[in-house]
Amino acid sequence: GAVVSQHPSRVICKSGTSVKIECRSLDFQATTMFWYRQFPKQSLMLMATSNEGSKATYEQGVEKDKFLINHASLTLSTLTVTSAHPEDSSFYICSATLRGGSNYGYTFGSGTRLTVV
Amino acid sequence: AQTVTQSQPEMSVQEAETVTLSCTYDTSENNYYLFWYKQPPSRQMILVIRQEAYKQQNATENRFSVNFQKAAKSFSLKISDSQLGDTAMYFCAFMKNFGNEKLTFGTGTRLTIIP
């Protein structure tokens, strides 16, 4: 089945530093990837839509200069949290859409727990 | 804009019993897709079941089935013969169509299966 590999699964960084999260589609080409943020015991909040070869589309209220998204190839999208602060601590999940016949929907990465100290 | 509402923040049921999770949504679209996702403690999102709005027949996947009422904009999930491994957060989600593929999630229902 279609797999999205997300790394790292867990990262702790110091306030003011930047952290990069990678999502790779392993056995399919993902022209579009989505980045979500999830606070404890809450639902997933869409941050941005990442399209291969073009600029990401950010949801209202998401700082594009803080959350840099790059989708340079059909199999890799990255989210960089720049100048991280404790309030950026959260669980970040990527996903990609699948198309074709009966196999449609979303496949999700395993998530990254970011802790900023 | 689409909205998805899950009115049951938490539910619990005895093992082997049947449980139904509720979901309602609001949209002006005629064709769309609905999903139930499970998020166990590992936090990996797992697709449970999906339904195309143009299909009248309710989707089923083994012990999981939905009751899709398009006119009422309701999409409930029934879990039969519940198992301990069903313990998880369950999210109902709406997708408008391919080409505008953003998923809109409900707030989730925390389901606990009691041994």
Image (cartoon, coloured by chain):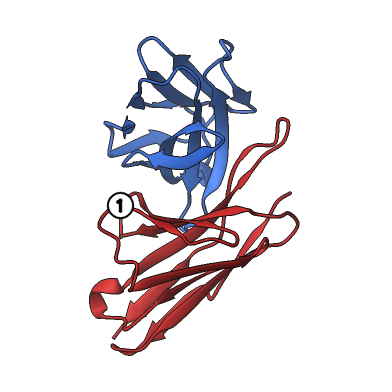
Chain colours: A red, B blue
Q: Position of residue A104 (x, y in %)?
A: 64, 37
Whether residue B115 is visible here, answered yes or no, is: no
Badge 1: few (under 14), some or many (20 or more) residues near its Cα, within 10 Å?
few
x 30%, y 60%: residue: A40
Question: Chain under label 1?
Answer: A
Residue for badge 1: A42
**Is residue B94 placed above or below A87 in the rendered structure?**
above
Residue B45 visible within the image:
yes
Instruction: Report the residue at 50% width, 74% height from top.
Output: A21
Q: Compare residues A80 and A72 and report the one nearer the observer.
A: A72
Looking at the rendered structure, the number of numbered marks drawn on it comes to: 1
Q: Amino acid at mark 1?
A: Gln
Residue A102 spot, x, y in % from top left: 71, 30
Q: Residue at x 35, y 41 (%)?
A: B108
Q: What is the x, y in percent for residue B45?
A: 51, 51
Identify which residue, B4 or B44, lies in the foreground. Answer: B4
Q: Quadrant of the C terminus of chain A?
A: bottom left
Against B16, is B102 above or below?
A: below
Q: Is residue A66 above or below residue B7?
A: below
Residue B104 image point, x, y percent: 39, 40
Q: Nearer the viewer, residue B111 or A98?
A: A98
The residue drawn where x is 39% and y is 9% is B71
Quadrant position of residue B60: top right
Can you tell which quarter of the image residue A23 is in?
A: bottom right
- Residue at disc 1, secondary structure: loop
